[in-house]
Image (cartoon, rainbow, N blue to C red):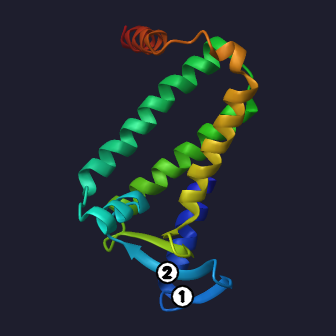
Amino acid sequence: MILIVIDQSIKITINAYFRECQFEIIPSFLEFNPTFNIQHSWVNTLINKNFGLNVGLLPHVILYLFIGVFFSAYFFYYRNNILKNSRLLDTSIIFLYAAIFCALIGNLIWIKGTLDYIYLKPLFVFDLKDTYVDLAIILFIIYVNRNRAQLKSIKTRDVFLYVKKRLLKEKT
């Protein structure tokens, strides 16, 4: 929750007081440039810019929810069956959930689109939520690399059977 509050507080402050402000942080590399992204994600912005396609809001929301469910299944399987005590995995999933909730808030609540404010020249404008995603991925890759031997035996089918078993157990 703290990560979500930080992300949204920064956006609320920028929107209220610094919307028209623009300056270079690192010349010719990073720039503070608040922008409402009506394309819902930087990936969609690049797709729209290069191919003229706009995926739209609903597919983004569905994708965020799918990612949350998919990674939750793997997380709980790993946590309960493989490595019962992994701060690295826990931290990765915290950053991932914060990013997903921030993305949902940004796409569903901010009327003008998601507010991004750091421009990585000449590629795209991003925000703290995008950094959460990057940290989640980096930590997860480190986790997988460190625990490669234990993770080799995992099959996606086993994860889904585990989730199904847990869901059926909780219903009864």
Amino acid on which disc 1 is placed: Phe
Q: Mark 1: which secondary structure?
A: loop
Q: Which residue has dot 1 on it?
A: 18
Asked if residue 78 is positioned above or below residue 131 in the image, the reply reads above
Q: Which residue has dot 2 on it?
A: 34
Pointers 1 and 2 in contact (CB under 8 A)?
Answer: yes
Residue 38, given in percent of the width and then of the height, sits at 32, 70
**Residue projecting furthest to the front:** 50
Camera-nearest residue between 162 and 119:
119
Numbered badge on residue 114: none
Q: Is residue 140 left or right of residue 98?
A: right
Q: Is residue 86 left or right of residue 40?
A: right
Residue 21 lies in what quarter of the image? bottom right
Q: Residue at x 50, y 29 (%)?
A: 72
Asked if residue 17 is positioned above or below residue 29 in the image, the reply reads below
Q: Residue at x 24, y 57 (%)?
A: 56
Quadrant where the C terminus lies? top left
Residue 92 lies in what quarter of the image? top right
Q: Is residue 43 left or right of residue 30?
A: left
- Give neighbour class at mark 2: few <14, some 14-19, many 20+ (Cα, 10 Å): many
Q: Is residue 129 left or right of residue 106?
A: right
Q: Residue at x 33, y 60 (%)?
A: 47
> Which marked residue is nearer to the observer: mark 1 or mark 2?
2
